[in-house]
Amino acid sequence: MQYDVPRLAAGPRTMKGMEPGAQSPMKESEDAQSPQDPGADTAAASDGLRVLGTAYKLAKLMLGIGGLLFGAHVGLRHDSEVTLPPSTVTLQAARAAFSTRLTKPELPRSGAAPKPPAPFQPVRYPAAPGPLVGYLTADPGDGKRHPAVLWAHGGFAGIGEGLWGSTPMQRGASVRVLKEAGLVVFCPAFRGENDNPGRFELFYGELDDLLAARDFLAAQPFVAPERIYLIGDGISGGTLALLAAVASDRFRAAIALGGAAELGRIVSQESSSELIPFDPSAAQESYLRSPLHFAAFIKQPTFYFGPGDSFFRWDVRQMKIRTVERSVPFDAFFIEGVTADELYSRVVALLASKIPDDLGPQTDLKFSATDLATLSPASKSMR
């Protein structure tokens, strides 16, 4: 088994030219392989990562863009894009053959998570770095198992007042809507956040923490383990939700409220330089944090919502194109005429009305034209 990376194709693309259902602007080599089984050999993945690094260096030379950061679009206009090839092995196999290298000093932390008001209670869940803090809504006390939402928080500082505050940028109203719909809600913090052990890795070890949080939630006696949904909030939570969707089938469904399909979109921004804990010129670091390249391995229904002017729209379009080609259960919606905060609160309200009635052995979660009209009259799906 060989971890071959298809020939890199790159060039200017405009979002206006990318209509729903259009062919992928990335032309793969004729000998590109279909995804391998999750048990792919990690030694082969390691070879593939070295090939990937070579392909990246060649791409820099061919494109003549000295500052290109692994698909990060440095030096390119917002509507000019570079598409990198998909992986032929799972994210888990590729990561098993690689060790992230954190090269920058750790940023200051936000401190211990404040004590939450009811209905939250503070908990610690087991994870690789050690016990990590989270907020879990209380046992309803009715002896029943309830559907649950794991809420991957927005921002990179951890959990706190934003989960119960009432300003437009806070998510207290959304969390309350989920709780009032009869759902258990768990909001974990990840390594290096608040006073948690470990250090911030930007979508690397945090993915392992999120999956550990899911297992903790599934073990609660008042939670139906087969009915756990993942909602990722904003750039941080949304990206983690997409990574979890490509890495695991343990969630009934995953919903990303924003997020980056290609990490280069974040790495390329000068304003993000202090946030990036690794060498931004290291090809594998960004690749193994980018859901786009592993989209073919999504098993459970996964949905992406973003405003019409989303900075991540082009990359998510590529993710949609790649999944359509293989009938992967992924859909994405960009909603016109609404801000991100307005959109996310409306999507959560819609989910709160749908999840309690999603009772079958497999999820029947979907979004109709009527549903989208409740988000914005000008809403569009990328089908």
Image (tube, grey):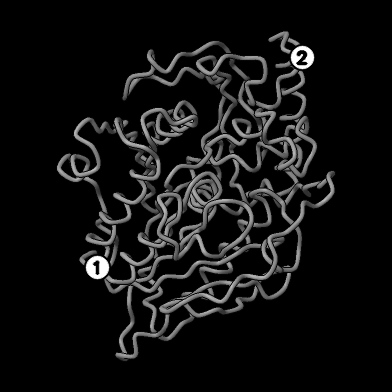
* 343 with respect to 133 (left or right): left
* 69 with respect to 213 (left or right): right
Find residue 192 and report its image quarter: bottom right
Find residue 115 and report its image quarter: bottom right
Camera-side residue: 99 or 139?
A: 139
Residue 32's x, y, as percent? 56, 27
| Disc 1 element | helix
Q: Residues within 10 Å of mark 1 (few under 14, many from 20)?
A: some
In the picture of the structure, the residue carrying the numbered disc 2 is 66
Q: Amino acid at mark 2?
A: Gly
The label shown at residue 373 is none
Residue 92's x, y, as percent? 63, 52
Toward the front, the furthest residue is 167
Q: Residues within 10 Å of mark 2 (few under 14, many from 20)?
A: few
> Residue drawn 65% across and 36% down?
287
Q: Quadrant of the C terminus?
A: top left
Q: How many marks?
A: 2
Residue 97's x, y, as percent? 75, 48
* 131 with respect to 86 (left or right): right
Q: Quadrant of the N terminus?
A: top right
Find residue 253 and report its image quarter: bottom left
Q: Amino acid at mark 1?
A: Pro
Q: Earlier in the sequence, mark 1 or mark 2?
A: 2
Camera-side residue: 152 or 60?
A: 152
Is 32 drawn above or below residue 326 in the view shown?
A: above
> Residue drawn 74% across and 18% down?
67
In the picture of the structure, the residue carrying the numbered disc 1 is 356
